[in-house]
Amino acid sequence: MEKIKFRLFIFFLWLGACTPTFAQNRNSIWVFGDSSMVDFGNAGSPVTGVSGMDGRGSCVSIADTSGSLLFMHLRGQQFHGNSGLIYNKQHQLMVNGDDILGQGWYNEMVVLPFSR
């Protein structure tokens, strides 16, 4: 009986390792502060594009579970003082998106999805 359980375990382990896996696509779009972006939504061929963010500093973006861009944030002290800029998915500055305070460090921002 133990031998059958072991073989079933190995079979399901092999089956899980050989089938493709799919993530939630929340990080499938990368936006950079130098007006560039990369969309990893297509598994074999990433697509490059242009973003509305122009500046140096930390950038963060998040997509929904289907891989569509929700918003992005740029933080660059040399251009925006002590605030950052939040852009919508059309690469336009959001309402009240220029009053987010923070420090001028790299990698200081994190966007977490709100789950109910």
Image (spheres, rainbow, N blue to C red):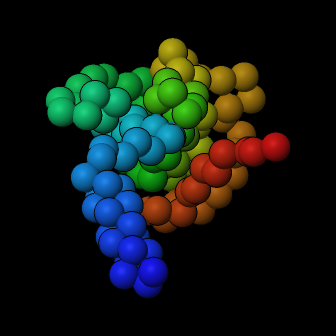
Return the x and y of residue 49 as percentages of the image width and height.
Answer: 27, 23
Q: Measuring from the top left, give residue 65's x and y in whole percent.
A: 55, 33
Residue at the spot 36% in from the left edge and 46% down from the top edge? 21
**Height in image: 113 above or below 104?**
above
State the residue at coordinates (36%, 81%).
3
Residue sitting nearer the eye, 71 or 83: 71
Q: Is residue 100 above or below residue 1?
A: above
Q: In this view, does 45 lie to the left or right of 27?
A: left
In the image, residue 99 lies at what x, y percent? 71, 40
- Work out whether residue 92 or residue 27 is closer to the camera in this orientation and state it: 27
Residue found at x 42% / y 24%: 52
Q: Which residue is situated farthest in the left direction here?
A: 45
Specify the quadrant that holds the N terminus.
bottom left
Do we see residue 1 in this rendering?
Answer: yes
The image position of residue 88, as x and y in percent, is 58, 23
Q: Which residue lies furthest to the right in this view?
A: 116
Say how many tags the image has.
0
Compared with 28, 66 (above or below) is above
Quadrant of the frame with the C terminus: top right
- Residue 5: image quadrant is bottom left
Q: In this view, does 45 lie to the left or right of 52?
A: left
Name the side, left or right, on which 63 lies relative to 48: right
| Outermost bottom residue | 2
Residue 33 appears anywhere in the view: no
